[in-house]
Every structure is written in structure tokens, then in C-alpha cells.
Image: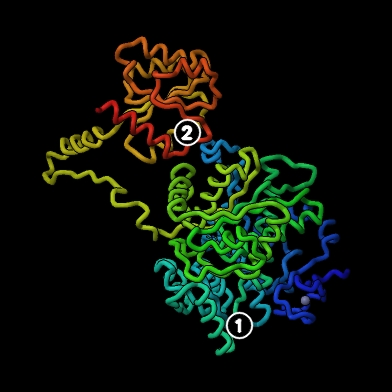
Amino acid sequence: MGHTPRLKCARCGAEEPFEKVLERCPRCNGDWLDVVYDYERVAQTWPQVLRERPFTMWRYRELLPLQDDAHRITMGEGGTPLLHAVNLGMMLGAPHIYIKDERQGPTGSFKDRQASLSISMMKELGVTEAVVASTGNVAISYSAYSALAGIKLWAFLTSLVPAEKMREVAIYGSEVIKVTGTYDQTKQVAAEFARRQGLYLDRGIRSIAARESMKTVAYEIAEQLPLFLGPGLTPWRAPDWYIQSVSGGMGPVGVWKGYQELVRMGLVERMPRLACIQAEGCAPMVWSFEKGLEEVEPVLQPRTRVITLATGNPGPAYTFLARVIREQGGAFEAISDQETFRAMHVMAKLNGLSMEPAAALAFAGLFKLLSKGIIQRDEIVVVNCSGHTFPVEKHLLGEDWAKTVELPLEAPAVEDGLLSSLEQLDRSVQRIAILEDNPDAIRLLRRILQARGDYQIFEAYDGESGLEMIRRQRPDVILLDLMMPKVDGFAVLDALRADEDLGRIPVIIVTAKELTTSERARLSGQIQMLLQKGTFTDEELLHEVLEALGEKEG
Ligand SMILES: *Cc1c(COP(=O)(O)O)cnc(C)c1O
Ligand SMILES: [Zn+2]
């Protein structure tokens, strides 16, 4: 094998030197061609040479299919952080959840990788005007990179794409064409337009650039995981699971190829399993897989608010992913819009990550796969946080998302007025004590409560100082851990019950301890509720707290 990359047909296996981009296999006319490289040669220099290079996707230059660096169109895409999801992991009882934060790309989604390589390859081909169909993010990203490359872009979007995203496309100077139809219809209109006008058409999943760019997500995760977990037998590592919300399927298809290349080069030991999560109202892959189909059965009328993911006909991507998941393990899962928006809240409020619904859907998928036992709680999981939110989801926050403090108009009364206004705020505040020796658990409980209500929170790390605090602060509810240094939770309960006043405060036990029968007997009748750490959701905790507060008032 020579040093130049080769093109290999996925259908018939024919190979030839990669000198120019071919759309179809010259032998069988198949339209899925993969680039294969001289992996043995690259493996001799990776990972050493990479140490010297900046952390963007172009550090993997040897395995990207651009011929001449002069055509590279780049804005620092790729090289996104891998975050350890501490609060989320605490809530789920899953300590090895990592987030690939693709929100941090130049236009806020992981499509920036695809745009950088696709537009660079267009430039190499001499394209000056191009057509793309999109559910939003591809159009935004391609528009930015086309602007930089001096390429005119015709962006065909379904009219369901939120106006804010449409404007984002337009601001880069692209022609925005709204098609009142589904995304699949929009693709057909775009293709027909390109054919008639003789313009270059982006081929989506069938294009080499899309898959070759997405594989850099796999390389980066492999390079980043050892920073948290230490090296294994190989210099880099693969997670047990890669989770992504899926529309056309470019991400997981590319990521799969990336890991195959790394395994072949001896840089990671094994392949991860793929979890492809789709919106219930447009989940052709999930339903086709359940029926055991080899070819996808398209969804003709998508019904989901998550427009980014409304690809009704993913075509060959399904065939590819279904085979991988059938043969190597993995999962397809469908998520309702309601679960998606709930996950969006949870991720913002508990982990500080505001993301677009399409990204949140992958997290909802994680919750579901954990609770079904398909993903084990001790497995290493990477979730692709695929895109940032634009502030378009107005319905998410409802009406009462801010509080107003009204000041009286007359100047002299300002201080009085301010005080009484603040008192009014105070009155709605309820007091909660948390007795818990694990700081991560305290932070999680505090976040759940802070995010939802006007709670004043008091914290203690052991039973002794906890009791003192309770006597001083007279909280409305107590959240109590059972296993604490010095005075444990059982002893705290006994002390509370011995005091006429304090004995009336409702107590919610939050514990990681498996209780024995006699311990359960000791607690019975003494507490409001027992929540097992790592298995309750934020909503369950809040529900219990509100019940406890209600009981006190009633
Ligand atoms: C495009 C996109 C997806 C789906 O990507 P595919 O791998 O092509 O299915 C998910 N989330 C966001 C934010 C996206 O922009
Ligand atoms: Zn072929």
C-alpha cells in the first residue's frame, strides 16, 4: 500500500487511489465510499507528534482527506473539552459520566467539524457556490465557514426551524430558502434546485467530508479519557458507551469509523458501544430496529418539537448503525419531547450546562438506558453535548421565571419600601437543613432545591453540629444522611424525637446505605420518606420536600 489515501467502496470493496472526490464507485455504482489511509505509517508517529500540535480537529491532519493545506478553512473547531459530570453522576449514582462539550464550537454545535472539512474540500474542488439542506445547525455552520471561504451558500431549511436559527443563517449572508414541508422534502427541493442550476450539492451522510470530520470526536475522546482514568494497556482509551442524539446519523457513523481506525493503529484496546437516541415523534431508526429491518422504514410525518432531529429518512446511516449495534451491542432508544425538555432543565440547573433540546435528548436517553439497566452504573459513558441553545425555547420557562421587586416612587421612603419588599420575598422563603457528610451530595441536594424554590438552606457535615444547627435555625424540613461521623443519622433522629418542638419537624432520609430489617423498623413512623442515593430524580426529592412543607402548614 502506498502513502496516499485510498477510496474503498462499502458495497463491493473495490479500492483505488484517492486522487479526487468520487461520488460513486466506478465498479458497482455504490454511493458510499470510505477513505482508507496508511495506518501503519501514521501509527509510527502518533501519538508523539500530536503533543506538539494545537488541540483542534486539524491536529489529526494525516487522517483527514484534504489534499492541500492551503485550502484549509478553519476557526479552531474541534478540541472541545471533555467534562466529568460530577453533579449528574451523583444524582444518577453513576460516577463515570463524561460530557463531550460540543457547544463550544465556533457556531455552537458539532456541525462545525463537518463544516470546516466540507467547506475546505469544496474550496479544493474550486466550488464557489453551493447548496445545502438542513434542520438548522448545518446551515448555520456552513454559512459561517462559507463566508470565510468566499463561497456563496444556498441554505434550504424546513419552515419549522425556529426563526432565531433562520436569522443566524441569514446574518452570514447565505440565501435562506424556507420550505413548507418536512426536512426530507426540503432535501429533495434543494437537490432539484442544485441540479437545475448546476450548483454543487452537499451530499450529507453520503459525503466523505461528513463522516471523516465526525470521526475526530472519537479521536479526541480517546485522547482525553486517560486524563481522568489514567492510561489502560494502550496509550488512549475508548469509553464503554458513546451516546448521541441522532437525526441523519453522521455523528455515530463517523465516531464508529474513528474508533475502528484507532483500534487498528493500536491506540485504543476496543470499540465502545453506540447508543443512538431519537425523538419519539421522529424515530425511524428505533422503530425499524425493533422490527428487525435491514433497511430503514422512513417516518413520513415527523411530530416533534425538536426540529434539529427531524430526519424522517436516514437512509444508509440506519443500515450501517443497525448492523453495528446488532453485531457489537449498543442501543437505539426513543425519547418524548417532555422527557427532552425535562432533561434540558436538569442539565442546566444541576450541572450548569444550557444546551439545545437536540443535545438534551441524549441525556434523557442516558437516564432511560440507566434505569432500564442497559447501561450499568459503573460503566464509562461519554455523552455528546451536541449543541448550544439559542434562547428560542420560550415555553420552557413558563411565565414566572423572574421575580420583581417594586420600589415606591417617593424618594424618602425608598429604604422602608425596599425593606418591606424584601420582607415579602423573605416570607416566601422556607428553611431546609441538610445533614450530610459527602460534599458532592450536599452540592447536588442544594442545587436541586435552589433551582426550584425560595429555600434557605443550612448545611452540616456531621450529626453533632447538625443537631446544634437545627436547634439554632429551626428549619421547616430536615434532609438527613444516615451514615455520618461522630453522631450518625439514627442518633440524630433519636435526639430530635426526644425534644417536643424539634420532634415535629419532618425528616427525609437520603442515604446510600442498604438498610437491614431492624434499621427499617427503627425508622418506621419516624420519617417522612426514605430516598436511596443515586436512584431518585430531582423531581422525587422536590416532591417529598414540598409534601413535608405542606404537612407542616396543614
Ligand atoms: C445534527 C445534530 C444532531 C444529530 O446529528 P447526526 O449525527 O447527524 O444524527 C444532534 N444534535 C445537534 C445539536 C445537531 O446539530
Ligand atoms: Zn463498489
Residue type, numbered disc 1:
Tyr
Locate residue 142, reporting x and y percent. Answer: 55, 71
Q: Which residue extends farthest right?
A: 1
Locate residue 33, reporting x and y percent. Answer: 73, 73
Looking at the image, is 251 positioned above or below residue 157? Answer: above
Residue 370 image-quadrant placement: top right
Q: Which residue extends farthest front?
A: 291
Disc number placed over residue 200 in the picture, else none? 1
Nearest the viewer among 483 and 413 is 483
Q: Residue at x 58, y 59 (%)?
A: 286
Ligand 2: give its quadrant: bottom right
SS assignment at label 2? helix
Q: Is residue 202 visible?
A: yes
Within 10 angstroms of label 1, few (less than 14), some, or many (20 or more) residues?
some
Of marks 2 and 1, which one's residue comes earlier in the chain?
1
Nearest the viewer among 235 and 444 is 444
Within 10 angstroms of label 2, few (less than 14), some, or many (20 or more) residues?
some
Disc number placed over residue 354 in the picture, else none? none
Locate residue 331, reporting x and y percent. Answer: 63, 53
Locate residue 131, reporting x and y percent. Answer: 55, 79
Residue type, numbered disc 2:
Arg
Residue 57 image-quadrant placement: bottom right
